Amino acid sequence: MEGTENKLPIAVTIGEPSGIGPEVLIKSWFKRREHSISPFFVIGSPDIIQKHAQQIRRPIPLEVIEHPSEAIEIYNRCLPIVDLGLDSDFHFAVPGQNTAETVIKAIDCAVDFIMRGQARAMATAPIHKAALYSAGFTSPGHTEYLAEQVQKHIGQEFQSVMMLASEELCVVPLTIHEPLHKVPELINHALLVRTIRTIHDSMKKYFGLASPRIVVSGLNPHAGENNSMGTEDSQIIAPAIEAIQKQGIDVKGPLPADTMFHKAARAQYDVALCMYHDQALIPIKTIDFDAGVNVTLGLPIVRTSPDHGTALNIAGRGTANPTSMINSLKLADRMSKNISPFEMIHDV
């Protein structure tokens, strides 16, 4: 069905109620025409949205819907919302255990809508993991939890890959929320090959690149400098790159991380694969802190999220910048517009 525009709405999860998620959702809806944001609906609680709207003095028309299909018709006059009917009492900047079920259920519901062919993609507002653990949340992060939920629906295991994307740079951390001292032991041939393959296939499928250009950073300073600063680059990373090159994938490395991100270097590739969290996130957040988008690759569904957290320190003040959420919605639209629900579930 590629080439046929998918007109289903985008499902948006409400995220942590006490953070800035609901605020940037409100601001995004108000900017829907200015930024040509395709129809979306929120999953969560109208009371939470209204409390944020009142706090930031941005009254917003809401309409509770029973089915995602209702969102298309009413989107231009009001914000459609699926009411989960759960506890909606919260305090700004103070995450509470009582709303954890709402946060988790919203994610589950969004996945379910996509799997049923009722929504075409999901954009997720930031969550506060510490507030969710008491409600049974055991995943190390949002991305990993989504992979678990998709697996429950399909009965197939998926390797999720987190990509941070902006107009200037796209980066993928090979290891994500891991202590730095554990990173070397986690880097292996199979993980590198799977991740590079996932990046390549996703950039072709969702971003229309015929031959994505991928570069891979080294782990050690100067990519090991002929083993004088570590052997992982020559003994693990380089052989994996050589193996994937033989499959016809345009990938280069390992490259010294300190020379990969200046403007001239960035012009030579489409995506940079880095070995650990900060190696990837520091450059993109330095280059474009407010506009970056977190994209989940490797799953049979499209999921984007703002590249920022709950920002509890400014919650309820009306100062949250909605740019990253707006870009998340626009990128979810771009990635899913020409892909049918059947393809998103089965064409992996």
Image: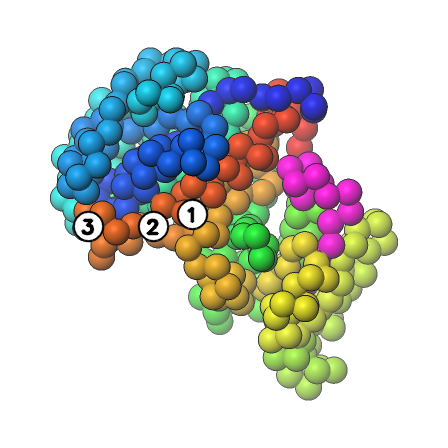
Circle 1: residue type = Ser
Q: Which residue is mark 2?
A: 321
Q: Residues within 10 Å of mark 2 (few under 14, many from 20)?
A: some
Q: Quadrant of the C terminus?
A: top right
For badge 2, the amino acid type reads Asn
Residue situated in front as seen by the camera: 292 or 343: 292
Q: Assign the N terminus to one quadrant of the image.
A: top right
- The quadrant holding residue 259 is bottom right
Circle 3 crowding by C-alpha within 10 Å: few under 14, some 14–19, many from 20? some
Task: Report the residue marked by disc 3.
Answer: 317
Is disc 1 placed on a helix, strand or loop?
A: helix
Give the CA distance from mark 1 to mark 2: 8 Å
Compute the Cα span from label 3 to label 2.
11 Å
Residue drawn at (42%, 55%), measured in percent from left and top? 290
Can residue 260 be seen in the rendering of this structure?
yes
Highlighted range, magenta? 202-219
Q: Which mark is residue 324?
A: 1
Q: Position of residue 20 (x, y in %)?
A: 28, 46
x, y percent for residue 237:
70, 65
1 and 2 marks in contact (CB < 8 Å): yes
Indicate the amino acid at tag 3: Arg
Q: Residue at x 74, y 82 (%)?
A: 226
Q: Is 203 contained in the magenta span?
A: yes
Q: Dot 2 lies on which element?
A: loop
**SS under mark 3:** loop
Q: Residue at 58%, 57% (x, y): give it.
A: 168
